[in-house]
Image (tube, rainbow, N blue to C red):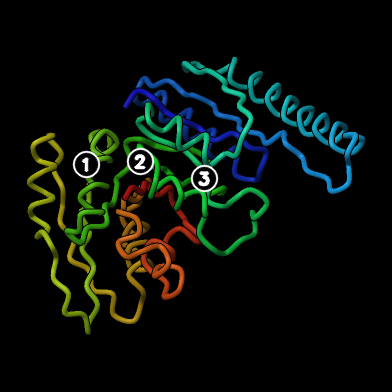
Amino acid sequence: MKSLLLHINPDSGMEARLQVALDLARAHDAHITCLQAVTLEVFAPGDFYGSVMAPAVEAIKKSADNHREKLEARLKTEDVSWEWLFINGRAEMRLMEYSSLADLVIIGAHDIGNDASKGPSDLAAHLALNGAAPVLVVPETVKSFDAQAPALVAWNGSSQSCAALRASVPMLRKASETFLACVTEEKSRDRFDLPPLEGARYLARYDIDATVLELTAKKRSIADTLEAAAEMRECGFVVMGAYGHSRLAEFLMGGVTRKLLSEPKLPVLITH
């Protein structure tokens, strides 16, 4: 893993994801591409001569420049390789485009302007479903990232969990322990598409010894069960396949992806 794509935006989670990106870059000797996407097109009804639009654009650009100057000054003191991209446009579209040549996209847990939101990030969903690289969703409470901490992989044998498992191999190779967690509900009759041991055998080919955990949700949700298991084992991050059902179904009925990404306690690596 050599190319990290970091979402730059002056929200409350910026410091957390910057620190995670720095720690990952050091652990993997990776390069950080800082992508700052700013929409400079401002529409004001009736502003035929641009008397409203021009000052608004200038204010937006000045704010973006100030944020860039502060972070660039910080990055110059760090011992990592990095570059800065300032691009006009919506963040979700620009991140999706540049994810094509990234090994990992690092974003916050909440959308711009929704720091207090209790729902999952639309940006995370968009990138997981349409981007070309796995996405690491970082809670704003995270202070650092220990690449050697244990990792927990949510496994149900689906194509989504298989994709997440493959995408997480570079990070799992650094982890001190890997737990392959399979959660069943007491009344569930669902069976795994692929048995847990297939996932463990796949990881073994990369010299990753995975411990299979068979967990029962009981009265808790699957997401809460996974979080509790990760916390008990002092894991540094969680891996999961995103949106096993359609995203609309996840939104209407609630799903593991939606629940785990609404208020994550640990960084969550997702891919579809």
Residue pictured at 20% horizontal, 63% vertical? 182
> Furthest residue to the bottom?
187
| C-beta proximity under 8 Å, tags 2 and 1 | no
- Tell me the element at label 1: helix
- From what the image shows, is residue 178 above or below residue 24? below
Image spot of residue 96 (x, y percent)? 45, 37
* Camera-nearest residue between 220 and 234: 220
Q: Label 1 is placed on what type of residue?
A: Arg
- Tell me the element at label 2: loop
Q: Earlier in the sequence, mark 1 or mark 3?
A: 3
Q: Which mark is residue 142?
A: 3
Position of the N terminus, as image quadrant, is top left
Q: Label 3 is placed on what type of residue?
A: Val
- Between the C-alphas of marks 2 and 1, the distance is 10 Å
* Residue matched to label 2: 134
* Residue matched to label 1: 166
- Between the C-alphas of marks 1 and 3, the distance is 25 Å
